[in-house]
Amino acid sequence: MNDALDDQWNPTDQDGSPHEGGFRARFDVTTERGGPRYGEFNEQVRLLMDRVRYACPTGELTDELIADLKSINGKLADVQIDEWHTPAGTRIDLPARGNITVPPYDVTDAGPDGVTAQITFRPYHLGGNDAAHGGQVAVAFDDLGGMASALKIQGVSRTAYLTVNYRSITPLRTPLTIRTWVENLDGRKVYVKGTLHEGDRLCADLDALFIRLKPGQP
Ligand SMILES: CCCCCCCC(=O)SCCNC(=O)CCNC(=O)[C@H](O)C(C)(C)COP(=O)(O)OP(=O)(O)OC[C@H]1O[C@@H](n2cnc3c(N)ncnc32)[C@H](O)[C@@H]1OP(=O)(O)O
């Protein structure tokens, strides 16, 4: 990868400190970065992906959309910073902490005993036949399984394995309940379980292992 590309994907850290490992033990969460309408901005991006997923534009409209998107991407190119200071991932007041790459969830309960959240898979999370893509269900379990691990060990861990059993169809556009909790701790090994329900119906369950990172471990 050349230097220009490397800079594009790894913008310089704002405070110049070296990365402390796979995830930083501490980074500032916020309700302010991106401004008071950042949540609305997130929603527009999600809506864009919903519309793109089901759109069949004419060639002329595709030309117009490319021009519009180039303009938007140009504006965003001017405000790139490192991952530790972006609103996406640190805006704790927004669904999925403002991270549009994760299916939007709202945490309703979180602590050392586990995490409960309401999650809604969007139209753009389509796998097929109006059901959620299995990989998107795994993304949700990874994010919230990682959160359960972090809250239990009060530290950072990485996913070693993540097994998802798909028990029944996971619907789109429907509020679902997702739960994750630490089942067992064995040294650095954090065994996490999880469930995804529509009402009483089990859609999927999780069996995962997270490993607590050693100081400085990438
Ligand atoms: C709040 C926000 C949450 C966001 C959560 C998002 C989480 C993520 O997506 S992380 C990204 C995906 N994961 C990765 O990229 C991880 C890549 N893998 C790695 O970095 C390393 O393999 C890592 C860190 C998992 C383990 O490596 P290392 O720290 O050297 O540990 P290592 O000594 O190999 O293993 C520790 C123990 O775990 C066990 N172990 C490690 N991997 C596995 C595995 N896949 N299956 C079973 N056991 C395993 C080892 O056998 C060992 O056991 P014991 O202590 O009994 O001998």
Image: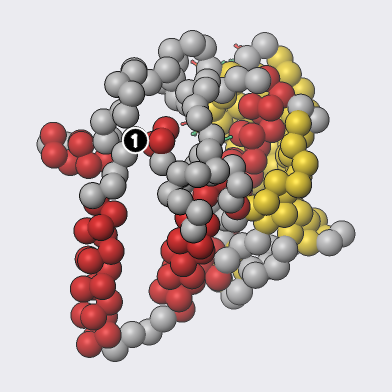
Residue depicted at 67% across the width and 11% down the height: 187
x, y (%) of residue 170? 68, 63
Observer-nearest residue: 148 or 192?
A: 148
Q: Which image quadrant is residue 129 in?
A: bottom right
Side of 9 where 124 appears, left or right: right
Residue 6 visible to an observer of this rendering: yes
Observer-nearest residue: 5 or 96?
A: 96
Amino acid, disc 1: Asp
Q: Quadrant of the N terminus?
A: top left
x, y (%) of residue 47? 48, 70
Q: Quadrant of the C terminus?
A: top left
Task: Say which element carries label 1.
Answer: loop
x, y (%) of residue 194? 74, 42
Q: Is mark 1 within 8 Å of ligand 1?
A: no
Residue depicted at 45% across the width and 51% down the height: 35
- Give the labeled residue for mark 1: 82
- Up/down of 161 relative to 67, above or below: above
Q: Quarter of the picture for ligand 1?
A: top right
Residue depicted at 41% across the width and 35% down the height: 85
Q: Which image quadrant is residue 206 in?
A: top right
Side of 116 where 187 appears, left or right: left
- Up/down of 23 relative to 177, above or below: above
